[in-house]
């Protein structure tokens, strides 16, 4: 069945470095994917909409130069956290709409820790 | 703007007793509403959704929710809790202009005691 995967599931990086997170739709294509951020014991906040073949759409307050999104193909979107700082430590989740069932499928998330 | 408010951050029940997780919505239009569940280390899973059809929506794992326009509510219920129901539950509304864009409530953590 339709599944969304994320890689890596967790990553630790040093302050100032960049980290790339992949989101893949398995067995279905997604022209749009969504990236969320979830702080501990809090809700999911939409960061941006990833659009295949065009620029991502960022939510208000999200730095587009810090959170680079590339929708490289109909099954892959990447989120790169550039020059990461400890305050970027969070749980990042992606989703993709599965049009056959009119439903969003979520990835299992990536836990980023910046030291 | 669309929004949802989950009235309880934590709910604790005993196994076998009913579950009620409360959600109120705010919307200028007829909304699409969802309940998602998040188990530790697993992706969010859709429990059920309301899209202006029947007001009583049945979902997976015995959960159901009733859309009440007069009360702007979409409470999630289950007649008998199971230990495996312990998780974080999110009430969600879709954006008006883009129904793929989801707006999450703050979540309710459900604890189930034996």
Image (cartoon, coloured by chain):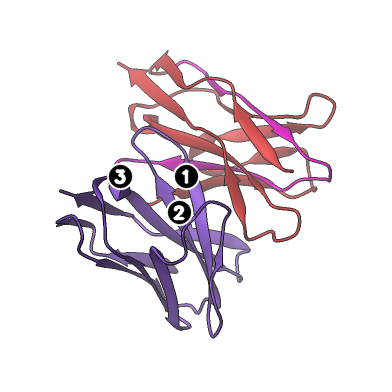
Chain colours: A purple, B red
Q: Quadrant of residue A39?
A: top left
- Circle 1 is placed at which residue position? A44
Q: Quadrant of residue B110?
A: top left
Q: Is residue A2 left or right of residue B91?
A: left
Q: Residue at x 32, y 64 (%)?
A: A6
Number of residues whose C-alpha sits closer than 10 Å to that of mark 2, classed few (under 14), some (14–19) or many (20 or more) = some
Q: Residue at x 24, y 46 (%)?
A: A86
Q: Please state which of the two labelled residues, at mark 2 or mark 3, is closer to the viewer.
A: 3
> What is the magenta range?
B17-41
- Image position, residue B56 (x, y; %): 73, 36
**Quarter of the figure with the N terminus of chain A:** bottom left
The relative height of residue A72 versus residue A50 in the rendered view (above or below) is below
Q: Circle 1 marks a residue in which chain? A: A
Tell me whether circle 2 and circle 1 mark residues in contact (CB < 8 Å): yes
Q: Are marks 2 and 1 on the same chain?
A: yes
Q: Element under label 3?
A: helix
Q: Residue at x 24, y 58 (%)?
A: A9
Q: Tell whether position A105 is magenta.
A: no
> Is B113 or B38 nearer to us in this picture?
B38
Q: Please state which of the two labelled residues, at mark 1 or mark 3, is closer to the viewer.
A: 3
Q: In this orientation, does residue B42 appear?
A: no
The relative height of residue B20 versus residue A96 in the rendered view (above or below) is above
Task: Using the image, tell me which numbered label, if any, was put on residue A63.
Answer: none
Task: Using the image, tell me which numbered label, if any, was put on residue A36.
Answer: 2
> Is A67 or B51 nearer to us in this picture?
A67
- Image position, residue A89 (x, y; %): 28, 47
> Is B19 or A45 nearer to us in this picture?
A45
First in sequence, mark 2 or 1: give its number: 2
Number of residues whose C-alpha sits closer than 10 Å to that of mark 3, classed few (under 14), some (14–19) or many (20 or more) = few
């Amino acid at each position: 069945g339709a599944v969304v995967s994320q890689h890596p599931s967790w990553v630790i990086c040093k302050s100032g470095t960049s980290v790339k997170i992949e989101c893949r739709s398995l067995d279905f294509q997604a022209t749009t994917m969504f990236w969320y951020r979830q702080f501990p014991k809090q809700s999911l906040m939409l960061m941006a909409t990833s659009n295949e073949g065009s620029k991502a759409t960022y939510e208000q307050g999200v730095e587009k130069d810090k959170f680079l999104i590339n929708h490289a193909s109909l099954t892959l979107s990447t989120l790169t956290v550039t020059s990461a700082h400890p305050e970027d430590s969070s749980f990042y989740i992606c989703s993709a709409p599965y049009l056959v069932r009119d439903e969003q499928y979520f990835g299992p998330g990536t836990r980023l820790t910046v030291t | 703007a669309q929004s949802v408010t989950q009235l309880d951050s934590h709910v604790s029940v005993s196994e076998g007793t009913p579950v009620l997780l409360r959600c109120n919505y705010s919307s200028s239009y007829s909304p699409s509403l969802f309940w998602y569940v998040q188990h530790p280390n697993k992706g969010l899973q859709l429990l059920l959704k309301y899209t202006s059809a029947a007001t009583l929506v049945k979902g997976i794992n015995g959960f159901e929710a009733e859309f009440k326009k007069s009360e702007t509510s979409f409470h999630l219920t289950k007649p008998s809790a199971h230990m495996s129901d312990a998780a974080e539950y999110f009430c969600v509304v879709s954006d008006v202009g883009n129904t793929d864009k989801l707006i999450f409530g703050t979540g309710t953590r459900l604890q189930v005691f034996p």
